[in-house]
Amino acid sequence: MALALPSYAQTINEANHCDLGTLAKPIYAAEQRLQYRRLDNGLQVRTLALENTQVVSIASQFDVGSRNEIKGQTGYAHLFEHMLFKGSEHAPGDSYTQTMSAFSGQFNASTFFDFTNYYLTIPSQALELSLWLEADRFRYPTLNDTTVKNQQGAVLEEMATSIDNQPYVRSAMEFLLDQVEGTPYGHAVIGSIADVKAATPMSLNAFHQRYYRPDAMQLSLVGDIPPQTQSWIDNQFGDWQVPEFEQSKLSDLVVTPKAVHGEIIDERGPWPAVLLAWHTAGRNSPDAAALTLLESYLFQNSGSLIQKNSLTDPDQLLSYSIPLQMTHHGMTNLVLVPRARTSLDQLTDNVEGLIDSLAAEPITDAKLCQLKQVWLNKALAQLDSPVHLAKALSATQPQDKQHPLTGPWQRINAVSAKQLQATVQTYFTGGYVRLDLLPPWYIRATKSILEVLPQDLTDSLEESVM
């Protein structure tokens, strides 16, 4: 059932204080129904029963990602994610995908710097079988020459389609990664072509034995949950032994911001663009909540400063931002594509002006309240999607172990305008990374001419082309 959300005006009371308590009640109510257990082997289990549904979503997240890969084995976390759909000891070959398809189940997975997650939605009558299949592939995957070679091809094709065949992407990605070279975050999640090709069943099995372990896993179930569910979980996961060696631990990166200006030329590039990036902080940082709101206010939502700056006669054709907030580091990024009349320098100056204005004067309490409401509305939307809610629960941070839904909200709600201003000053007013993405010389030459023509003529030419 969809939630009825109060209007923005309702969140500001007569004293001009932000009051989102009523709006946040469904989050507290959902968390009160949440059941949490930690098995003896360290596996964390969260279940949330929902009424009036006949399906259940399962999400499993492992504390392993590209940050755990060593030299010569980049891309292993992502490649192994692919392998887990290609057979296990008691469900060989395509048994997993065929069984899920027979139940009209929806399933997928993803890999990031810090984690790998697997998720599916199936009819609740298939839950026991699904838990058995999940446990079997996590604990006893089949790794042989045939399946490894097959999935190496799949990963290399994905790499070509999403990265190497796209203008600017590979070079820009490597430029950003070079800013933290020598750290666990200094290489791409998808890995290098050479390392993916060199993977063997033996090396992937060693990776599995080290990182796929019950004390590195969070399992979440949301939906129609039968009474026997906890017993099924115990039967499939309870005897999974913890390896003798301890989990690897990382520390937060310490990066001294400095001004970096580079450029790349791609003969496939259709038009110039500029990529701006700022080193920030990881999810465990005391500044993480303020950074989340700040990134939204600067670049992301429809009411952001960059969007407001685009309402009348903008200097950019489009803007694009996906902040990277890892466990031990963060990076806010912004890609801007200029109008024909606008230089990359002008776009950069525009962004600097937005940041300087926010650093000089705190935002109003009303605006801060609106930012918090936008965040809260997204959190509430998760309650209407079992699979998104299950994924969120399986990604719970250690500090929120007992309060996976309300803990993040309370930190967001506690952010003040002064804290937001201080966060701007700390992370956005020092040196930042600028990378100019440049097309072939003839496009650059044409663009340079357009920048000095009268604005009316440039706009007219631009409109006729578009």
Image (cartoon, helix red, strand yellow):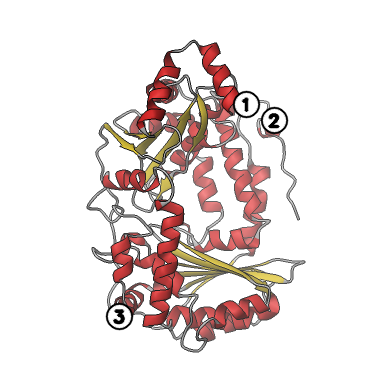
Q: Residues within 10 Å of mark 2 (few under 14, many from 20)?
A: few
- Marks 2/3 in contact by CB < 8 Å: the verdict is no
| Numbered badge on residue 16 | 1
Dot 1 falls on a residue whose secondary structure is: loop
Q: Tell me the CA gap for discs 2 and 3.
A: 60 Å
Q: Is residue 142 visible?
A: yes
Instruction: Give the image location of residue 459, x and y in percent.
Output: 55, 18
Is residue 135 found left or right of 333 in the rendered image? Answer: right
18 or 64: nearer the viewer: 64
Q: Could you tell which of marks 2 and 1 lies nearer the N-terminus?
A: 2
| Numbered badge on residue 9 | 2
Q: Amino acid at mark 2?
A: Ala
Location of residue 312 (image quadrant): top right
Instruction: Give the image location of residue 353, x and y in percent.
Output: 42, 21
Q: Amino acid at mark 3?
A: Met
- Picture mark count: 3
| Circle 3 residue | 202
Q: Amino acid at mark 1?
A: Asn
Q: Tell me the CA gap for discs 1 and 3.
A: 63 Å
Q: Could you tell which of marks 1 and 3 lies nearer the N-terminus?
A: 1
Dot 2 falls on a residue whose secondary structure is: helix
Quadrant placement of the C terminus: top right
Instruction: Give the image location of residue 462, x and y in percent.
Output: 55, 23
Q: Residue at x 38, y 66 (%)?
A: 77
Q: Residue at x 53, y 46 (%)?
A: 410
Where 6 sits versus 382, above or below?
Answer: above
Q: Could you tell which of marks 2 and 3 lies nearer the N-terminus?
A: 2
Comparing labels 2 and 1, the label whose residue is closer to the camera: 2
Q: Residue at x 44, y 29 (%)?
A: 418
Instruction: Give the image location of residue 456, x and y in percent.
Output: 55, 12
463 or 72: nearer the viewer: 463
